[in-house]
Every structure is written in C-alpha cells, then in structure tokens.
Amino acid sequence: MEIDPWHRDRWRRFMTNAFAVTKDAVLPDGTAYSSATRDPRTGKLIPVDRGWGGGPTRTGRSAIYGWGCVNAQRWLPGEDLVGVARTILEQLDLDTFRFIMPLDPAHELPPDWRIEGELLDHDSLVSWLWMYWEGRFRGYW
C-alpha cells in the first residue's frame, strides 16, 4: 500500500477476498489446514490430502498468515484480521511450530514424514515473533 498507493482499491479487494476465503482454515489450536478445498454446496472448508504426510495434515505455518493479518489490519479496518492473528499468536507453541502435523493430534505421521513433524520450523517461529512484535508496535495487544 505504501509502495504503490495507486493500486489501493485493487489491493484491498484482493486482500479482503483472500481473508474471507482462508480465515476459517485456522484451527482452534492456532494451526491451519495444510491444504483444503471448499465444498461448493455448503461453503464448508474440507481438509484434503495433497501428498504431504500421508493424508490431510495441518501446519504451524499459520503464523505466516497471522503475520500477514497483523500487517494488513490497518488497511482493512472492517475485517477482524487481528482476531484471527490473536488465535494463532495465543495458541501456537513449541509443539506446533512445525511444518507438518497430523490433522488429529492423537495420530502420528507416517514414518517417512515423521521427521518433518518433529523439527521446529523456522518460518513458523520467525513469523510468530514478527506477528507478536508488529502487533505490539501497532497497539493491537
């Protein structure tokens, strides 16, 4: 917005639509579906298997999305982007800063994917820190 102010309306439309389509992919524990599709009849978001982790999975990279929400909130005051970011911020922890996890925490990933679920994901962790500090700077928390 600051770099290219001539495209503000276009950018706002794009971001508002992107937020409306993806905000319900964030799960109560702050993670998000790794991949999902929307049922055209019900509008419900359904997790799908895209070949990662041996079935539908979730990710801690929702922190990247949360940081984007914090960054965009000032430009989209009619949307509750900070509310979604707050869920991510408050719920992700050392157990969920992972690139990939089973959809159901009670299950394990298949052996060939297990290492991916055991290593801290730097993209998740750095985005979470950025989200936190930018939110503090902007007075969101």
Image: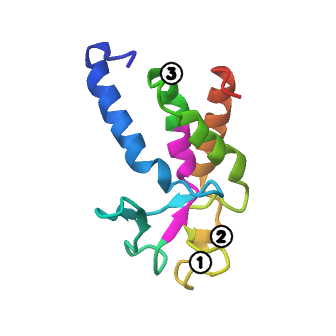
Give residue 40's position: percent from left, percent from top: 28, 62
Disc 1 residue type (three-letter) = Arg
Q: Looking at the picture, does residue 4 appear above or below residue 52?
A: above
Q: Image check: 97 left or right of 53? A: right
The Cα–Cα distance between marks 2 and 1, rounded to whole angstroms, is 7 Å
Quadrant in which the C terminus is drawn: top right
Q: Looking at the picture, does residue 107 appear above or below residue 42?
A: below
Q: Image check: 15 left or right of 111? A: left
Disc 2 residue type (three-letter) = Glu
The Cα–Cα distance between marks 2 and 3, rounded to whole angstroms, is 36 Å
Q: Are marks 1 and 3 in contact (CB under 8 Å)?
A: no
Residue at 32 percent of width and 14 percent of height: 5
The Cα–Cα distance between marks 1 and 3, rounded to whole angstroms, is 39 Å
Where does label 1 land, which residue?
114
Where does label 3 land, which residue?
74
Please provide the residue range marked out in magenta: 57-67
Q: Earlier in the sequence, mark 2 or mark 3?
A: 3
